[in-house]
Image (cartoon, coloured by chain):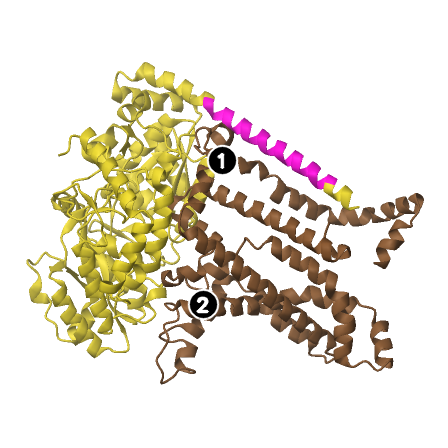
């Protein structure tokens, strides 16, 4: 808040000198912008593929138009409901659960003073660096019906559970695995934000007799709000995308679990693996992007209504 | 600040759009000029086949300007180390015979389809390629393949290819009358429901297999599933710690039943493929139900591992590791040797079904010429040589003499001193994909008359009535995706006997019907009928 007021009161000359001072920062951002341009903007004309009946002979622009035929397969089946439901519901749960735990862990870490703090931080970050394939086998080591840890220790002597055949457990397994894998990374941004807070505020509060809990609820959380909103907004924008590795590898691609593990991404992948049709994948990409775009705008609008200062744009 | 950033990004988008348009436009225009020139050459000389080919070769040699033909295929081990040296070795022969250089592009099976799709779509140079994994029909549908008879290309420059095949075998690669592919010389039939068991295990339970061969020369014991069931339960008793039986889920339907998945998918099949062209539902057919019931029984008897649903390790690797007793395989001449090699010990092969040639036998993985190819004549001549020149075929299949293989003195070849399958710089083990392995040298362990036996096996096997039928399902692709998703949910559970088929098959059937199974079967039947009429098949 303070920053914005300060900016509005600046004279034009001051503004210009600020611009000048920012030039090195822009230069630093240049490689990232170039990457963004090459990776995210240059392929954009390819969107027309979604509306084409692609033939290699005629090229992308020479191929005949197909209207919305390529979108048909996404919606024309009974799977459309299941995959949309799975994608959105899982992501909503992920956003809420990840937020609560990431902020919680970040606050705990920030309050730690022991030397082991760095170690804890690295240890909880480690799963994030593992590929989904490795994670899937870690999970398999626990859940394998024959040799798995769970069936042979916790459930020893009782009826073993055929984990990769029983749907009802998987929503919980997936949420847990996602949390375990992502929490180290998710809490980094919160942690670094918390560390940047003015320690004077805490000292003053401590002198006034505020308990640790009061310091957290009255200082840390309110200051953290803009960061929370921004990261949540970004997560909402990706609500139509699912972590492919999580939903394809971790359930070991077990057919019996499809109705609780099939998301838009895995559905498209399975469809394309057999059909090999790039126009259909382009259509799915366009659909995902459009809905994601609308969701970001809507979420931002909602935030603007509630708390104009925290809105992204 | 934000507004400036937005402006910058918007600017980038515009530039991006232009950049995208520009490069694509140029690419599309460039290759168009070439084929026209080629066509003239072909037209002028098409009259006399042999001489036209020779003249084209002479002309290239005289000019001293050797065009380069890029050949792509896939293996299971990634690009081999010796790829450049082998390309050179092959070029030495092709330069001398037809005045062309060749360059190999060998990709791992995991990425082959994706890479090829990209290369074909983007116009990168690849002239000859095997359509395995990429899919013959998808390639045709997307317009990637060249008409091989355009201006009598095959007739003029591919005489040896024509001689290597029966007309029926070539014609199976026609789609709507246009020839797009050349089949590979390989095992065209497959013995259905073969079972492979290490001899040591059979000896252990005292099973007398030696007396079961019909003749001394035989390598396969013909029997039935009840007999196998007896063996398996003895094995299960003797080795409770091992998995008794396992089969790769993806090939249960294709390798265990006498059915023909016409059009390449299990939704509507020929349940009586030798006599009838009626497309019917696989899952309510007796064969499928019997198989699922049998597997359910076997699973109840404890033959399968509880982990079978998520198993990804190859069966032979499991046998080698000592964790599996028996597995399913498709049989053919040389199968006992092949499986023994893979398992690391001698195996005995049983077979419970007939030998059968499916409708897609000749067009599952034909070789094709990229429609973007700049010099189709050179490409066709290279292909022709791969089917007819034993020296070239041997290098293509096995690598360079002295480096990858040496003569053993009795007509075989084998690894030189100090070289093995692991450190060889060119040991692909995919000769079933490499044009004509029948004319290449024979590796040690294989019988010298393997290819005569193979030809006999191919000729004698029963063939599907729909032999050569291909189908473009793009009009019903939405139904196909939906059906494939339903089937994926049940396939492994049913075919590995984890659920009771009498309960679950009707449930699956109901969902398949809801996903449009009847429409899909009707579309397939209509296409098959049209094909049969066009080809004069009753």
Q: Nearer the viewer, residue B65 or B500?
A: B500
Q: Nearer the viewer, residue B147 or B70?
A: B147
Image vertical order of residue B5 relative to residue B178, above or below: below
Please state the horizontal and vertical placement of residue B336, each as a whole percent of the image: 19, 59
Label 1: which secondary element:
helix
Residue visible at 24% across and 77% down in the picture: B239
In this picture, residue A24 sits left or right of residue A233: right
- Mark 2, residue position: A170
- Mark 1, residue position: A51
Q: Are marks 1 and 2 in contact (CB under 8 Å)?
A: no
Q: Nearer the viewer, residue B167 or A271?
A: A271
- Span highlighted in magenta in the image: B7-32
**Looking at the rendering, which quadrant does residue B162 occupy?**
top left
Q: Residues within 10 Å of mark 1 (few under 14, many from 20)?
A: many
Chain name for mark 2: A
Please state the horizontal and vertical placement of residue A167, each as a whole percent of the image: 40, 67
Q: Is residue B186 magenta?
A: no
Q: Residues within 10 Å of mark 2 (few under 14, many from 20)?
A: some
Residue visible at 82% across and 75% down in the picture: A202
**Main SS of the magenta segment?**
helix
User: Chain A colour?
Assistant: brown
Residue A193 visible in the snapshot: no
Residue B83 disc label: none
User: Chain B colour?
Assistant: yellow
Image vertical order of residue A201 relative to residue B455, above or below: below
In this picture, residue A168 sits left or right of residue A14: left
Residue at mark 1 shares a chain with residue at mark 2:
yes
Image vertical order of residue B129 relative to residue A219, above or below: above
């Amino acid at each position: 808040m303070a920053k914005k007021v300060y900016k509005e009161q600046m004279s034009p000359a001051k503004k210009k000198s600020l611009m000048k001072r920012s030039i090195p920062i822009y230069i630093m951002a240049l490689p990232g912008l170039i990457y963004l341009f090459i990776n995210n903007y240059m392929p954009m004309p390819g969107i027309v593929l979604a509306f084409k009946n692609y033939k290699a002979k005629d090229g992308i622009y020479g191929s005949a138009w197909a209207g919305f035929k390529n979108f048909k397969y996404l919606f024309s089946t009974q799977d459309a409901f299941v995959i949309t439901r799975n994608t959105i519901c899982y992501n909503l749960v992920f956003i809420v659960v990840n937020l609560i735990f990431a902020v919680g862990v970040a606050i705990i870490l920030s309050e730690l003073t022991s030397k082991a703090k760095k170690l804890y931080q690295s240890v909880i970050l480690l799963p994030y660096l593992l590929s989904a394939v490795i994670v899937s086998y870690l999970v398999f080591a626990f859940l394998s019906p024959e040799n798995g840890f769970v069936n042979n220790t916790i459930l020893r002597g009782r009826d073993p559970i055929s984990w990769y055949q029983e749907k009802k457990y998987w929503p919980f397994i997936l949420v847990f695995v996602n949390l375990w894998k992502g929490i180290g990374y998710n809490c980094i941004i919160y942690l670094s934000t918390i560390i940047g807070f003015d320690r004077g505020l805490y000292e003053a509060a401590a002198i006034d007799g505020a308990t640790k809990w009061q310091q957290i609820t009255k200082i840390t959380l309110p200051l953290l709000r803009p960061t929370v909103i921004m990261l949540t907004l970004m997560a909402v924008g990706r609500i139509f995308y699912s972590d492919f590795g999580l939903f394809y590898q971790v359930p070991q691609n077990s057919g019996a679990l499809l109705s609780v593990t099939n998301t838009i991404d895995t559905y498209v992948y399975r469809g394309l693996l057999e059909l090999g049709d790039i126009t259909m994948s382009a259509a799915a990409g366009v659909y995902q992007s459009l809905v994601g775009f609308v969701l970001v705008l809507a979420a931002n609008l909602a935030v603007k209504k509630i708390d104009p200062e925290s809105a992204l744009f | 600040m934000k507004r400036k950033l937005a402006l910058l990004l918007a600017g980038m988008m515009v530039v991006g759009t232009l950049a995208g348009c520009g490069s694509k436009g140029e690419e599309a225009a460039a290759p168009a000029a070439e084929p026209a020139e080629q066509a003239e050459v072909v037209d002028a000389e098409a009259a006399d086949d042999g001489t036209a080919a020779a003249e084209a070769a002479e002309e290239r040699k005289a000019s001293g300007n050797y065009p380069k033909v890029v050949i792509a295929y896939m293996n299971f081990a990634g690009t081999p180390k010796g790829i450049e040296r082998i390309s050179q070795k092959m070029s030495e022969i092709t330069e001398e015979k037809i005045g062309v250089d060749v360059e190999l592009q060998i990709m791992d099976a995991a990425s082959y389809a994706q890479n090829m799709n990209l290369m074909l779509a983007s116009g990168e140079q690849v002239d000859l390629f095997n359509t395995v994994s990429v899919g013959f029909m998808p390639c045709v549908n997307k317009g990637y393949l060249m008409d091989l008879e355009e201006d009598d290309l095959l007739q003029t420059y591919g005489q040896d290819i024509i001689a290597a095949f029966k007309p029926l075998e070539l014609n199976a690669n026609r789609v709507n009358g246009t020839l797009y592919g050349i089949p590979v010389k390989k095992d065209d039939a497959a013995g259905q429901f073969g079972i492979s068991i290490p001899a040591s295990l059979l000896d252990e339970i005292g099973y007398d297999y030696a007396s079961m061969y019909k003749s001394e020369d035989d390598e396969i014991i013909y029997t039935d599933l009840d007999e196998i069931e007896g063996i398996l339960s003895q094995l299960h008793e003797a080795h409770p710690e091992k998995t008794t039986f396992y089969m790769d889920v993806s090939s249960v339907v294709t390798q265990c039943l006498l059915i023909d998945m016409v059009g390449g998918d299990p939704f509507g099949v020929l349940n009586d493929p030798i006599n009838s062209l009626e497309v019917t539902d696989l899952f309510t057919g007796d064969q499928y139900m019997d198989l699922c019931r049998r597997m359910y029984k076997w699973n109840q008897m404890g033959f399968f591992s509880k982990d079978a649903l998520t198993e990804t390790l190859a069966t032979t690797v499991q046998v080698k590791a000592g964790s599996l007793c028996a597995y399913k395989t498709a049989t053919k001449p040389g199968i006992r040797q092949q499986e023994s090699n893979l398992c690391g010990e001698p195996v005995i092969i049983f077979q419970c079904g007939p030998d059968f040639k499916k409708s897609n036998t000749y067009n599952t993985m034909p070789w094709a010429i990229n429609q973007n190819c700049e010099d189709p004549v050179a490409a066709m001549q290279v292909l022709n040589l791969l089917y007819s020149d034993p020296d070239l075929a041997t290098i293509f299949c096995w690598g360079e003499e002295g480096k990858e293989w040496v003569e053993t003195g009795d007509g075989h070849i084998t690894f030189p001193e100090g070289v093995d399958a692991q450190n060889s710089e060119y040991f692909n083990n995919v000769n079933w994909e490499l044009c004509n392995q029948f004319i290449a040298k024979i590796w040690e362990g294989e019988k010298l008359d393997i290819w005569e036996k193979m030809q006999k096996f191919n000729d004698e096997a029963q063939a599907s009535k729909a032999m050569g039928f291909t189908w473009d399902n793009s009009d019903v692709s939405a139904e196909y995706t939906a059906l494939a998703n339903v089937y994926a949910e049940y396939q492994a559970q049913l075919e590995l006997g984890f659920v009771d088929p009498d309960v679950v098959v009707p449930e699956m059937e109901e969902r398949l019907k809801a996903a449009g199974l009847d429409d899909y079967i009707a579309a397939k039947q209509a296409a098959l009928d049209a094909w049969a009429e066009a080809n004069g098949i009753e």
